[in-house]
Image: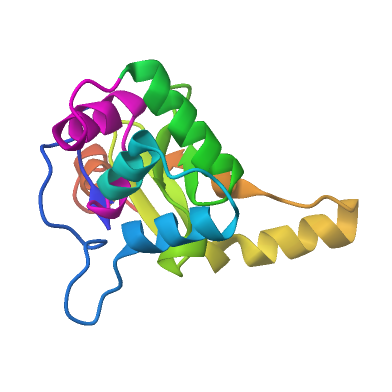
Amino acid sequence: MRDRRPVGTAAAPAAAAHEAGPGRPDLAAAGIAELRALGERVTPARRAVLRVLAGTSEHLSVDDVLARADEIVPGLHRTTVYRAVETLGELGLVTHVHPDHGPAVYHLASSLTGSGHLHVRCRRCGEISDVPADLLDGVADRLARQLGFRLQPDHAALTGLCRTCAAAADPPGHPR
């Protein structure tokens, strides 16, 4: 999954990898079912946030979620969306990452999608990409063995240069 827009500039809603379809579960419905199983209220805001995040593979700021959720439940207030995202996060249905020092961006948690991942962010163009969750397993094992430190990289984005920006930064024939 690649999101080539800088944070906070998400595109309008479109069909995406998380939407239900042949052979794909309805992740919003799964989230709603989990809310009910936990004895939590299924509010219009929580339902809308789940639908928005289930309908995209992008990493969305709260403002992006609000803009899309307003199409589902007109008149939602920004504070209400913040509360919904926060509660869904506490319940393990939504997660977020803080790219660089910018605002948090949100997506469905692996408890719903079935696939955990880490994030990398290009310092030049702002692209956020997902990478396999096991990418840092060796580093995590070494930190645990040597320092007793338990690495939890799921709320941070590793930074560097994406392939395109790295190629533009290095002249042809430049050794890496």
Residue sitting farthest toward the bottom: 23
Snapshot quadrant of residue 63 = top left
Residue under the image location 18 percent in, 26 percent down: 74
Q: Position of residue 6 (x, y in %)?
A: 25, 31
Q: Closer to the camera, 60 or 117? A: 60
Residue 6 can be seen, yes or no? no
Query: What residue range appears in magenta?
Result: 53-76
Residue 43 in the image, given as x and y percentages of width and height: 40, 38
Assign the N terminus to one quadrant of the image.
bottom left
The image quarter containing residue 104 is top left
Q: How many labels does the image show?
A: 0
Residue 62 in view (yes/no): yes
The image shows residue 11 at horizontal and vertical percentages of 13, 37
Q: Residue 168: which quarter of the image? A: top left
Kindly identify the residue that appears in the image at 34 percent across and 18 percent down.
78
Q: Which residue is drawn at 48% across and 40% down?
A: 96
Residue 66 painted magenta = yes
Up/down of 169 relative to 63, above or below: below
Residue 170 place in picture, x, y as percent? 26, 43
Q: Which one is in front, 112 or 125? A: 112
Residue 7, compared with residue 19, is above or below; it is: above
Q: Is residue 143 magenta?
A: no
Task: Please tell me whether residue 56 is drawn above or below residue 41 in the rendered image.
Answer: below
Question: Position of 99 compared to 64: left or right?
Answer: right
